[in-house]
Image (cartoon, rainbow, N blue to C red):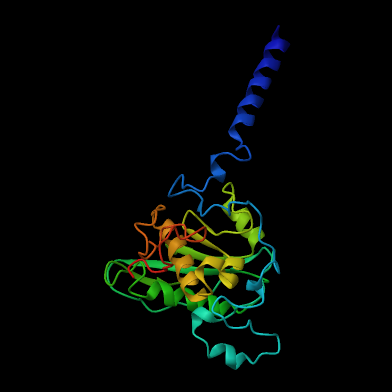
Amino acid sequence: MGLALGLCLVSGASAVLMVSVPEPGSELDSREETSATGPVGDGVPDDGTRARPGSGDASDESASGRSAPSPEASPTAEEDLPPLLRSVVEEVDTADGDLKTMKGEGDVMGEGPLTTFAVEVEKGLPGRDGDFVDAVEEILGDPRSWGNDGDRSLQRVDGDDADIRVLLAAPDTVDRMCAPLNTNGYVSCANGNRAIINQNRWVAGVDHFDDDLETYRIYLINHEVGHTLGHGHVDCPGEGEPAPVMQQQTLGLQDCEANGWVHP
């Protein structure tokens, strides 16, 4: 009798454990946001396929219409580009898996209560880490971003206590850090205070932005940082209007016009 009861208790505990594990295809794979504090992303394309390096023209030519710099290209020529158009490099699947916080502290940008952010980059990615840092600082420091010309000031720091962490990583690392959300090697996400940027989207953008990589990069940073600030997804307000930054523009524009700014 005692043995039978013990087996029943073990069996019952096992059943509870099985129920608590998310099933494939559950609501966690949905495109809709389930929590502003849990992993939040833009879902995956309708066909569910994972974009692979070299599967399209984006890995050979930047979304700004400029050819991607060749290994022989002069570093000076790359540095002459604005930060938002630098390091247009090849797409990858994986990198080293180790993250590094970029050292240095920036100026306080804007006015209002201070929000600090750190920038992290996965080791082993192509391109120059400093280009990503410069781009993030330029985007978040613009008054059209979350500072809203006085609502908030922002400053880049390199400590562990930063309010927000903006991270560039290879698709496999993004998938791991965004789990249990299904990013499928394609999209970015936010998880807690981390805005986790998929390297493939950063260097190649998406087709429906019509070769405008600059606008897409602005959108990508502002959208994922918006999630870390507690903002959820919204829809296009009307045909021909600027898409709200919290619209899932990676998946489509819904008849809106591409836009990366919080306050365009």
Q: Quadrant of residue 5?
A: top right
Which residue reaches farthest top?
1
Residue under the image location 49 percent in, 70 percent down? 216
Closer to us: 21 or 155? 21
Closer to us: 251 or 22? 251
In screen coordinates, is 247 left or right of 4? left
Residue under the image location 35 percent in, 76 percent down? 109
Query: Would residue 103 be seen by someone viewing this image from the given angle?
Result: no
**Residue 26, placed above or below residue 123:** above
**Residue 107, placed above or below residue 25:** below
Total of numbered circles in the picture?
A: 0
Closer to us: 19 or 264? 264
Closer to us: 203 or 249? 249
Query: Would residue 82 be seen by someone viewing this image from the given angle?
Result: yes
**Residue 221, placed above or below residue 89:** above
Q: Quadrant of the C terminus?
A: bottom left
**Residue 115, placed above or below residue 128:** above
Residue 207 is situated, as x and y percent measured from the top left of the image, at 56, 67
Q: Quadrant of residue 247?
A: bottom left
Residue under the image location 61 percent in, 36 percent down? 21
Q: Quadrant of the N terminus?
A: top right
In screen coordinates, is 25 left or right of 264? right
Residue 213 is situated, as x and y percent measured from the top left of the image, at 52, 74
Which residue reaches farthest right?
3
